[in-house]
């Protein structure tokens, strides 16, 4: 393994044709978190490990890369509406973008040479790369930065290996650890990190982030995506690029009908389980889960606590089942039809009552 391979790596959740956090040089929103990081850095109190916690796709990894650039000496550049920005011609920025900066290591799910995709977990071998990284000569700035993204993907062995390093952190080093579901992390890892909470982006920051990440995106598409994206840049980009806006409209029509239109549902499932429609398929699963959660909340608001609880339990069970289906590559059409069936069965049971 060359020294260059210690740098940034491709990630399993990269979106084709869209700049990922590695190449996104302007940060929108998250001003409180950024100010806390800047204050800690300028005051000489920069913690050895930070846990960047919040929903998927809202800018945690983008913030982590911005922090890495600043620590490793990149020149910052002001930008309209941006919380932070960096010059694209800066040598540190170029090195990080190429994955060749000696002061940065990016730990993600490794590639799976057999399938050509990515493994489902961050393995212990990936975390052990940190030992060689921290024994190497520090960068010109004196800092070494390890980005774990996201830590939720670590298996137990990888988590224990990371914990061992965090217990005796190397000098002039910091760990930037992103997490979508901190409850899945070892409590001992969380206790060694300084917590930064990230909230979903508001509409203006979300629009700015979309425009900066995918220049030339139609304004009407951005406007349509924002209410569906739940403050997530990633979700908005997926909606725009994978037909998600149309998928949500189709789903809304199906769910408003008094009776399930199984012919239409089967046709939709057939279309979205074709090769190359994986992103659209995932968007439909997410939209249907969101519909179950919304229905649960609606029932709670009208005093139907029992119905709300049953739907919440359905959401939990189906979320777990979908993760298992993805991990074991189960039949995608049947997975989707089972999710629809569970929603309709619960709805019909409440109507009958």
Image (cartoon, rainbow, N blue to C red):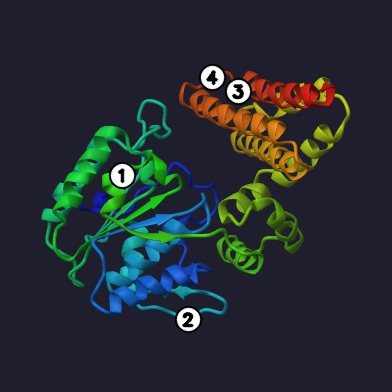
Q: Pointer 3: residues within 10 angstroms few (<14), some, or many (20+)?
A: many
Q: Is mark 2 on a helix, strand or loop?
A: loop
Q: Earlier in the sequence, mark 1 or mark 3?
A: 1
Alpha carbons under labels 3 and 2: distance apart: 46 Å
Q: Mark 3 = which residue?
A: 332
User: Nearer the viewer's eye, disc 1 or disc 3?
Assistant: 1
Q: Which of the image's four quarters has the N terminus? A: top left
Alpha carbons under labels 4 and 1: distance apart: 32 Å
Residue 78 has which mark?
2
The answer to whether the residues at label 3 and label 4 have Cβ atoms under 8 Å apart is yes
The answer to whether the residues at label 3 and label 2 have Cβ atoms under 8 Å apart is no
Residue at the image position 59 percent from the left and 33 percent from the top:
278
Q: Mark 1 = which residue?
A: 187
Q: Mark 4 = which residue?
A: 330
Q: Where is residue 93 in the image (x, y as percent from the top left)?
A: 36, 68
Q: Earlier in the sequence, mark 4 or mark 2?
A: 2
Alpha carbons under labels 3 and 4: distance apart: 6 Å
Q: Is residue 27 above or below residue 247?
A: below
Q: With 194 as the anchor, is 83 left or right in this view?
A: right
């Amino acid at each position: 393994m060359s020294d260059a391979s210690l740098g940034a790596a491709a990630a399993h959740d990269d979106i084709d044709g869209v700049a990922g956090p590695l190449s996104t040089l302007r940060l929108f929103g998250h001003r409180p978190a950024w100010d806390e990081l800047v204050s800690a850095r300028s005051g000489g109190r920069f913690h050895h490990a930070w846990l960047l916690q919040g929903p998927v796709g809202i800018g945690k990894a983008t913030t982590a890369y911005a922090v890495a650039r600043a620590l490793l000496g990149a020149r910052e550049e002001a930008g309209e509406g941006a919380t932070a920005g960096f010059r694209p011609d800066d040598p540190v920025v170029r090195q990080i973008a190429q994955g060749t900066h000696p002061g940065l290591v990016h730990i993600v799910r490794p590639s799976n040479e057999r399938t050509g995709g990515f493994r489902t977990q961050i393995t212990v071998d990936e975390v052990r790369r940190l030992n060689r990284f921290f024994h190497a000569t520090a960068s010109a700035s004196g800092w070494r930065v390890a980005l774990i993204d996201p830590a939720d993907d670590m298996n137990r062995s990888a988590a224990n290996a990371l914990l061992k390093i965090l217990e005796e952190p190397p000098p002039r080093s910091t760990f930037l650890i992103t997490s979508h579901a901190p409850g899945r992390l070892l409590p001992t890892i969380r206790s060694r990190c300084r917590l930064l909470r990230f909230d979903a982006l508001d509409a203006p920051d979300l629009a700015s982030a979309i425009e900066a990440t995918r220049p030339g995106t139609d304004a009407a598409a951005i406007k349509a995506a924002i209410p569906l994206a739940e403050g997530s840049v990633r979700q908005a980009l997926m909606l725009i690029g994978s037909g998600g806006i149309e998928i949500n409209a189709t789903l809304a029509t199906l769910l408003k009908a008094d009776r399930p239109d199984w012919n239409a549902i089967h046709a939709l499932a057939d279309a979205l389980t074709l090769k190359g429609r994986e992103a659209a398929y995932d968007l439909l699963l997410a939209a249907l889960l969101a519909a179950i959660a919304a229905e649960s909340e609606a029932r709670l608001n009208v005093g139907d606590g029992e119905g709300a609880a049953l739907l919440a339990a359905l959401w939990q069970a189906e979320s777990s089942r979908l993760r298992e289906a993805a991990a074991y590559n189960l039949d995608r059409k049947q997975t989707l039809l089972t999710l629809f069936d569970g929603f309709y069965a619960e709805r019909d049971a409440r109507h009958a009552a």
